[in-house]
């Protein structure tokens, strides 16, 4: 029997094909978020970029962990789409926050945080998520994420509130203007991806005082709005997954240390941890 594990953020989806406790293949497709995709679009994407990797008749179970899959309504969109392509498979759709928790904590208690294109956090008791703050998504939340960093950069650019050297460098690097930014923000699909695409500029210029301050404030906001509201924050290790957490680990550590909080693991992607989790705990996990 073949099992599929998918971890989908807003930018990309990591897939793993498992059979008899062996990893057969890993590959990537575009990020699938039911807040931005219709069921028909998801079906088309899966037929085009997932089905060619595996016979749809052989897949016994699919674990799909996805951004935007926090409500039954959104989970049902994924369930419907996956069932259309893999009619014989049992399908389990969970939020990407549970993927982060299982990958980072295994069967141990801890606080799991996501800092990638978006951001989120929760308390995990080794079996389930027991506490999490409200998540307001890209436009109203996602503090500390790649999307947030991009929004802050471009707002400072548009208002000419960044130093002249950075202003010129950003303008020349991305060849952007007001009309282009507003079109991507309000007319084109996936504004979160567009704004997150400017996060590499922050990494390239991370030692610039303006960028360093922007990043520091973003991580402080994340810790205040998300992590600081969680129970046992002073006792449990605080783990992170996501590209932003990896590349700015030193700033995160500084923000945690000043509060006396314990930094745990930092992973770029949950997939390796998810594979190990399902190898260790079988494929019957809900």
Image (cartoon, helix red, strand yellow):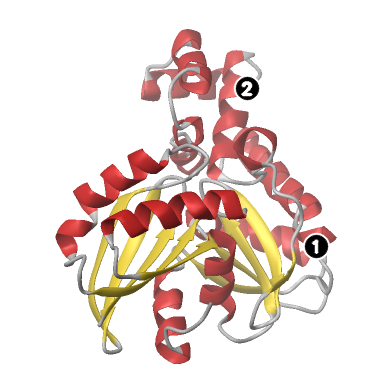
Residue drawn at the location 59% of the way across and 46% of the way down:
145
Horizontal side of 259 relative to 171 (left or right) equals right
- Relative vertical location of residue 269 with respect to residue 275 in this rendering, above or below: above
Q: Of circles 1 and 2, which is in front?
A: 2
Residue with the most extreme top position: 179
Query: Could you say which is closer to the camera, residue 67 or residue 165?
Result: 67
Give the CA separation, mark 1 to mark 2: 28 Å
Residue 52 visible in rendering:
yes
Tag 2: Cα neighbours inside 10 Å, few (<14), some, or many (≥20)?
some
Question: Which residue is denoted by mark 1 in the rendering?
Answer: 258
Query: Could you tell me which secondary element the residue under label 1 belongs to?
Result: loop
Question: Which residue is denoted by mark 2 in the rendering?
Answer: 156
Query: Could you tell me which secondary element the residue under label 2 belongs to?
Result: helix
Q: Position of residue 118 (x, y in %)?
A: 56, 47
Residue drawn at the location 59% of the way across and 30% of the way down:
151
Query: Could you say which is closer to the camera, residue 59 or residue 194?
Result: 59
């Amino acid at each position: 029997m073949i099992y599929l594990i998918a971890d989908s953020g807003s930018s990309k989806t990591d897939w793993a094909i498992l059979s008899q406790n062996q990893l057969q293949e890993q590959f990537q497709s575009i990020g699938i978020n039911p807040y931005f995709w219709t069921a028909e679009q998801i079906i088309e994407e899966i037929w085009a970029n997932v089905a060619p990797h595996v016979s749809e008749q052989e897949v016994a179970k699919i674990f799909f962990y996805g951004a935007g899959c926090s409500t039954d309504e959104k989970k049902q969109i994924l369930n419907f789409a996956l069932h259309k392509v893999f009619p014989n498979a049992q399908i389990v759709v969970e939020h990407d926050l549970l993927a982060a928790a299982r990958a980072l904590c295994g069967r141990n208690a801890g606080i799991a945080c996501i800092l990638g294109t978006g951001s989120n956090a929760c308390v995990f008791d080794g079996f389930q998520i027991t506490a999490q703050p409200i998540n307001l998504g890209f436009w109203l939340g996602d503090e500390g994420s790649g999307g947030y960093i991009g929004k802050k950069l471009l707002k400072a650019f548009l208002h000419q509130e960044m130093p002249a050297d950075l202003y010129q460098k950003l303008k020349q690097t991305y060849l952007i203007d007001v009309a282009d930014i507003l079109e991507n923000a309000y007319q084109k699909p996936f504004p979160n991806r567009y704004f997150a695409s400017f996060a590499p500029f922050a990494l390239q210029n991370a030692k610039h005082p303006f960028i360093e301050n922007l990043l520091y404030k973003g991580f402080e906001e994340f810790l205040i709005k998300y992590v600081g509201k969680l129970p046992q924050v002073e006792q449990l290790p605080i783990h992170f997954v996501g590209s932003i957490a990896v590349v700015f680990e030193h700033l995160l550590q500084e923000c945690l240390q000043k509060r006396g909080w314990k930094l745990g693991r930092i992973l770029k992607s949950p997939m390796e941890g998810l594979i190990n989790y399902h190898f260790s705990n079988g494929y019957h996990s809900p």
